Image (cartoon, helix red, strand yellow):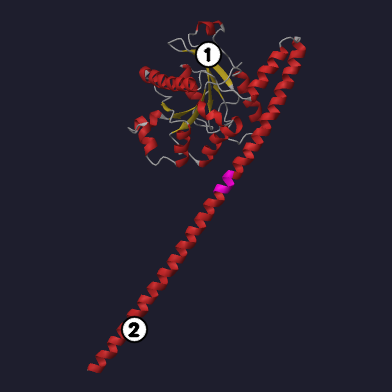
Amino acid sequence: MGGSSIDDDWELASPFGGPRTLVLVGCTGNGKSATGNSILQKKVFVSDANSAGVTRTCEMQRTVLKDGQILNVIDTPGLFDFSAETEFIGKEIVKCINMAKDGIHAVLVVLSVRTRFSKEEAAAVNSLRTLFGNKITDYMIIVFTGGDELEFNEKTLEDYLGRDCPEPLKELLDQCENRRVLFNNRTTDRTKKDEQIQELIYLVNLVVAKSGGKPYTDELFVELKKGARMLDDQTEVTKQENEEKLIKRLTEMVELKVRETTARLEQQLAEEKAARLFAQKMAQTAQMKSSDEILKLRESLERAERELREQAGKGKCAIL
């Protein structure tokens, strides 16, 4: 189950009713693994400045905070880049859900202040709702990485969001009820590390309170748990075979959803591109028309000036 480092007995000692499961999602290169390491307060997820992405498969690690709260943190590959094969995405989503059998307490959507929030990224984030339903929005928290860059430029997150904030990003923040936090994954300042974790946990607690303590689940979670109960009384060999069949069936279900989502996403982006090109063409046509009108007006003015000069010249000769 992805390398848990704490005994299950620790769950019994938690005053919070068991561990809370956080899932990191977002496009490749935004710093999901580095953020996971910051939350865990140790380097367990492989993280590197690599545009191709380092995380190859879903992985779960566990930590215990100073107050005794247990956190399960699941790192994911760039599931929502939609540049990967559908089969790979389907398997990884099912693997992620299998790790979080009891549900997800918060989905951490990782964005970077180093890059402008694009329509493509907005569409990829919105695909979460297509895959998991609109209810998933209630569990989403936006984590902005790159706090070190803002700090270097003496800017705050409010400065960043207030300065030409793209409309799709405003909409995303509205949907998340402005649950957002800034992370500096490069800081060595212990106080800053603790503060950003505390701010994140505060937002996680808000999500948990709003959901009545119920983690996010959908039909895939239900199917996995039901299948797991049915497998309990079977022999080890039969259990393994049937578990593989269950995972395969659920993966096919997710793959179908991913294909539908990808097709819808591609169509949406194609329509937006076509609309953008049409608007550019109309603007160019209007500009050309305006230029033509200006040229004609200039020619008319020059012609009128010539006629006036000619008339003035004729008048002068008559006077002489």
> What is the distance, in whole Å, between disc 1 and disc 2 at their CAs?
90 Å
Q: Mark 1 Cα within 10 Å, few/some/many (few <14, many 20+)? A: many
Residue 85 visible from this viewpoint = no
Q: Are marks 1 and 2 in contact (CB under 8 Å)?
A: no
Q: Position of residue 222 (x, y in %)?
A: 65, 21
Q: Amino acid at mark 2?
A: Glu
Q: Position of residue 252 (x, y in %)?
A: 70, 29
Which disc is residue 19 wearing?
A: 1
Q: Residue at x 67, y 31 (%)?
A: 255
Q: Amino acid at mark 1?
A: Pro
Is residue 189 shown left or right of residue 41?
A: left
Please name whichever residue, 50 or 256, is drawn nearer the observer in this view of the structure. 256
Q: Secondary structure at mark 2?
A: helix
Image quadrant where residue 294 sits: bottom left
Is residue 319 shown left or right of residue 294?
A: left
271 in the magenta segment: yes
Q: Mark 2 Cα within 10 Å, few/some/many (few <14, many 20+)? A: few
Image quadrant where residue 80 sits: top right
137 in the magenta segment: no
Classified by dominant secondary structure, the portion drawn in magenta counts as: helix
> Marks 1 and 2: which is nearer the front?
1
Quick one: quadrant of the C terminus?
bottom left
Q: Position of residue 180 (x, y in %)?
A: 43, 28
Which disc is residue 156 wearing?
A: none
Quick one: quadrant of the N terminus?
top right
Which disc is residue 307 wearing?
A: 2
The range drawn in magenta is 268-272
Residue 124 visible from this viewpoint = yes
